[in-house]
Amino acid sequence: MIEQKRRYNITTFGCQMNKADSERMAGILENMGFEFTEDPNNANLIVYNTCTIRDNAEQKVYSYLGRQAKRKQNEPDLTLVVAGCVAQQEGEMLLRRVPELDLVMGPQHANRLDSLLDQVFAGNQVVATEPIHIYEDITKPRRESNVSAWVNIIYGCNERCSYCVVPSVRGVEQSRTPESIKAEIEDIARQGFKEVTLLGQNIDAYGRDLPGTTETGRHLHTLTDLLYYIHDVEGIDRIRFATSHPRYFTERLIKACHELPKVCEHFHIPFQSGDNEILKAMKRGYTHERYRDIISKIRHYMPHASISADAIVGFPGETEEQFQNTLNLVDDIGFDQLNTAAYSPRPNTPAALWDNQISEEEKSDRLQRLNHLVGVKAAERSQRYLNRVEQVLVEDINPKDTTQVVGRTDGNRLTFFKGDLTELKGKIVPVKITEVRPFSLTGEMLSLVTA
Ligand code: SAH
Ligand code: SF4
Ligand code: F3S
């Protein structure tokens, strides 16, 4: 089918799910005989794996695309692919807007990239956005890191948060079987990876769509059961998971994380707003009291656990007082990290149509105030690391100081220290923390523990 070595480049926008999809698509392309090139301008096949969570994410894609579409006018052999969430949202419209495109494919079609490209190379312009049953991918992903790997365990989302575009672009929840997840993790371990992060938009929903219930009526396969099931894969030292939804977060899960030594004490549980009225309008299905309760339970079992979250400011109708409730929650909990965003109206979402939108000025003012508090609290949280010995999994060199390596603590804090990457990569080493910043640490290695 392909006569000569062709070069590909993938640019990825958006969340870890998209990054994991890109790694699988890269694996498929290499299997087809394509070679990776860093420089998109040197590639004859370009994939944009896109995100549409907020308007600015979507607009970025169009500016990138414009440049390559122009290039294609002189290089008709250039193959242009738009994958991911903008592709799903816009479908045919994208072809009308950018007629130079060869393939528009939604996220559910990532594992089928090869057969879609076959159609393209046969001379067709292809749009693949129909909902499908996601099938197991047999191609090995080309992973960015060789220490830490992402593993999708559930695709899609069945929630209907009133601001969110994800359910309409990612489709309904589809869980992979525990057996195939374990097989992938065993394979990852054989390749020398040390850490896995299990991924899902609403990871607590894992297993709801799989058959079987226990005697007490609980689903047979839950995230908690999965953690026990995969825990002992030899070679894997750390297990993480994201993203948790407060509505479904269970004490059973907290206990499992406490009990299982490889599961990191880091929880990413977005709360979105600290105000009950706003949470109701968002259709989140919990109150700020319930959220606080989850965090205290986590801290009861694991006093050192790191907590991170996402929050939105300027949701339609949010008053100054309601925004203050978000500040209060952030102040009370003290997050290690918080991803913040100004509300952005999205296509096919209820909240976008409401007439009580907040002005852009107000939204950006609130965002600034929230970010300021987040920085102050994160700096406070970092203090607890000072002079402590942390176990750091070494991943790479510090690009800003090549005499240093960088890794992450159990709680996911980036940590820098002097050391030799060839000796330390993939090892977990004890590091005494000597310097703290809001979102990263510096320390000194104590001694090398061989893994
Ligand atoms: N499934 C996760 C989040 C997925 S989207 C959850 O339920 O928490 C990642 C983050 O983007 C969300 O947590 C939210 O904070 C933000 N986000 C989603 N839609 C948004 C919108 N319309 N405007 C601004 N931020 C948004
Ligand atoms: Fe979006 Fe809500 Fe689903 Fe998260 S749980 S992906 S915010 S709809
Ligand atoms: Fe963006 Fe799609 Fe992820 S919209 S945040 S890439 S699920």
Image (spheres, rainbow, N blue to C red):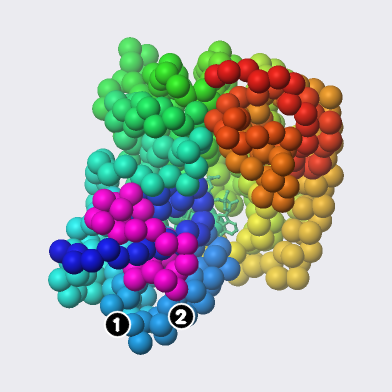
Q: Foreground mark, 2 or 1? A: 1
- What crowding class fits label 1: few (fewer than 14 Cα within 10 Å), some (14-19), or many (20 or more)? few
The kind of secondary structure element at disc 2 is helix
* Nearest the eye: 86 or 21: 21
Q: Position of residue 332 (x, y in %)?
A: 80, 35
- The range drawn in magenta is 26-50
The kind of secondary structure element at disc 1 is loop
Residue at 66% in and 20% down: 448
Residue 310, placed above or below residue 12: above
- What crowding class fits label 2: few (fewer than 14 Cα within 10 Å), some (14-19), or many (20 or more)? few
Q: Is mark 1 within 8 Å of ligand 3?
A: no
Type of the residue with mark 2: Gly
Residue at 42% in and 62% down: 37
Residue 311 placement, left or right of 152: right
Say which quadrant the N terminus sits in.
Answer: bottom left
Type of the residue with mark 1: Pro
Residue tagged 1: 76
Residue tagged 2: 66
Residue 365 placement, left or right of 185: right
